[in-house]
Amino acid sequence: MLKKSVTVLAPAKLNLSLDVVGTLPNGYHDLDMVMQTIDLYEKITLRRSEGLSLTLPGSFVPVNDKNTAIKAALAFFHYTGLLAGVDMTIHKRVPVRAGMAGGSADAAGVLVGLNDLYDARLSMSELCAIGAGIGADVPFALLGGTCRVRGVGDLMKALPPCPDCWFVVAMPSVGVSTPEAFARYDTMGSPVHPDCEAQEQAVRAGDLQAVCAAAGNALEHCSGAVETPAICALLRENGALTAQMTGSGAAVFGVFDEEEKARTALAALKGGYKQVYLCRPTRGGPRVTVRRPMKKSAQPSV
């Protein structure tokens, strides 16, 4: 039966580690990272249409040709050659300018959703190739789970699932511009260079303590996010094994080995910050939600 609409849940990401290891010939920074998707989702509904539209209820994110969801839809139709359109509604939950790849999650969710809605049967490799033209984090946003990611996000190696844990994520009052964060890094450098190889091996060994011991973010000290140290300190005071900024900022997260500690930290942060989340690691990228048919009511006996 022809589908008229699909709904996709697309997860945000955290950087368990982020190092800047050099500069590429094209001028971009050469990165080494371990990335993890979490169960904080963008909800994306796609409906067949003859045109192309995007609605973002309750969000201040601009709706224009620079929006990653629109870019993804245009790229999908260009690649497949389908003469079709889509009406997109995205309920955003992932903070903006947070280093959590909310925009990339939107693009990935649109690609996965359109692939299902129009039964295009594109492979993950094809989707990632399309996604790479939209943004550096889109291929990882498609794959999801736990990955070692290098270059500008184009070199990915899937890892075993992250050891079981809880994340408490807090978004400061002010976001961070990614280009400005990297520009400050070029001027200031960083005293932090995490051991991504050691962290990969710790993930493979299922050793959460070692994962946290190898964590770090080379952009944290030059992000310009003034609230980061205080949030990290509060997370550690409440039992976090480690606490750091994700991506180029400004969101900060702590890693916990016990749910009770995580919930205590969550409560401590809620007094000072509007966007605070308790999350778990996920094992994949965007997924199409399946509507379950309603059960027929029992018929009375006669």
Image (cartoon, helix red, strand yellow):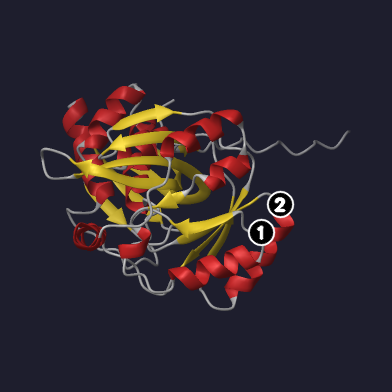
Task: Name the residue located 12 percent from the left edge and 45 percent from the top edge.
Answer: 27
Residue bearing the label numbered 2: 258
Helix, strand or loop under label 1:
helix
Q: Is residue 84 visible?
A: no
Viewer-closest of 222 and 94: 222
Residue 173 in the image: above or below residue 151: below
Percent from the top left, x then y, of residue 169? 52, 60
Asked whether 272 or 149 is in front, the reply is 149
Question: Which amino acid type corresponds to the residue marked 1 in the rendered image?
Answer: Ala
CB within 8 Å, label 2 to label 1: yes
Quarter of the image where one finds residue 223: bottom left
- Packing grade of label 1 (10 A; few <14, some 14-19, many >=20) is many
Q: Which residue is mark 1?
A: 262
- Residue 294's spot in the image, x, y percent? 65, 38
* Three-letter residue code for mark 2: Glu
Give how far apart the Cα atoms at labels 2 and 1 are: 6 Å
Residue at 59% x, 78% y is 271
What SS does tag 2 mark?
loop
Which quarter of the rendering shows the N terminus?
A: top left
Taking the spot 48% from the left edge, 36% from the top edge, the residue there is 198
Determine if residue 21 is in view: yes
**Quadrant assignment for the C terminus:** top right
Could you tell me residue 241's position as x and y percent?
A: 61, 54
